[in-house]
Amino acid sequence: MANLLSQGSTGPEVRTLQTELNRQAFPRPNLAVDGIFGPLTRNAVVAFQRQAGLTPDGIVGPQTRAALGMPAPGNPFTHAISLHFRSLTLTDVPFNTILSSTQAVYAQFGIRCDFGSGLSLGLTPAEAARFSQVDGQCKWNAAGEFLEVEELGGDIPSGGIGVFFVERFQQNLNGCGGHAPNRPACIVAKAGTNFCTAHEVCHILLTSGFAPVHIDVNTNLMHSVDLQRAAVPTLTQAQIDQVKRNPLCRRI
């Protein structure tokens, strides 16, 4: 398949891959940046895929590219968003899988998804008991416990989007994109699927005025139900255009 890198591939794309593996994989593989995808490069790819919560098959496809910050040939990154994670609980899906899945969604539209920061919130016992369930209604202008959760962990850097992981909601939902004015943030329940964060972030980028809010097509990221998906969900052209108009999706 086009754009896949695997053992036996050669050329400048492999050199970029080796450079990124040397920079991002842990422990550092110290690969020779020679443009030859040999056994050592494959081993480093497998190690990175495990680190990123991806299938460790040694093949560099769209999800591995996105996790490494490598655009696909012919589809360069033109925009970027910055996500700042704040955790009140561990998620059912490993965090690295959530991040790489979110990156894969946006990379297909030339949008790089950057890890801005991450913080596990050290709540007091009283706070932990209070926010074990987030009560209230998910509304565009967050209020009550929704707003209180999004105020935990200090200010989100200007231009960034906050993502808060919580135990559960009072409502039967896995995420909420409502937030206070000028404080873009969303909340995701621990039971959310690997693409739930991408969905809630998209609500923020689409803004409250965009319609339709949800599209009940199984392949669309903005389906009203947090579906288990076998493939990376997509967006319509209207959704993509609206996302890229948002100042939080900065041009690079």
Image (cartoon, rainbow, N blue to C red):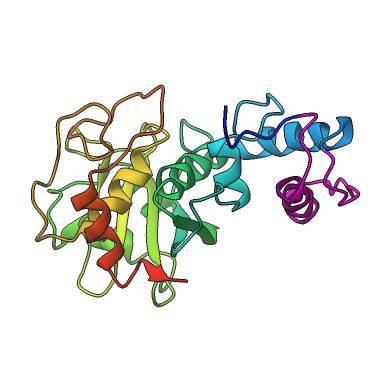
Occupied quadrant, residue 141:
bottom left
Q: Is residue 196 left or right of residue 104?
A: left
Near-viewer residue (8 or 104): 8
Q: Residue 81 vs residue 235: left or right?
A: right
Instruction: Left or right? Give the position of 75 relative to 207.
Output: right
- Is 127 rendered above or below residue 53? below
Could you say which is closer to the camera, residue 34 or residue 198? 34
Name the quadrant containing residue 124. bottom left
Quarter that holds the N terminus? top right
Q: Decide if residue 182 is in sight here.
A: yes
Q: Position of residue 202 (x, y in %)?
A: 28, 52
Residue 17 counted in the magenta span: yes
Label total for image? 0
In the image, residue 88 lies at what x, y percent? 44, 49
Residue in view at x 20 percent, y 57 percent: 178
Q: Residue at x 34, y 34 (%)?
A: 233
* Region of the chain picked out in magenta, as a range: 7-36
Name the spot of residue 109 as percent of width and height, x first. 39, 50
| Residue name at image x 41 percent, y 71 percent | 251
Residue 140 placement (x, y as % from top left): 13, 58
Say which residue appears at 74% left-offset and 51% top-offset: 12
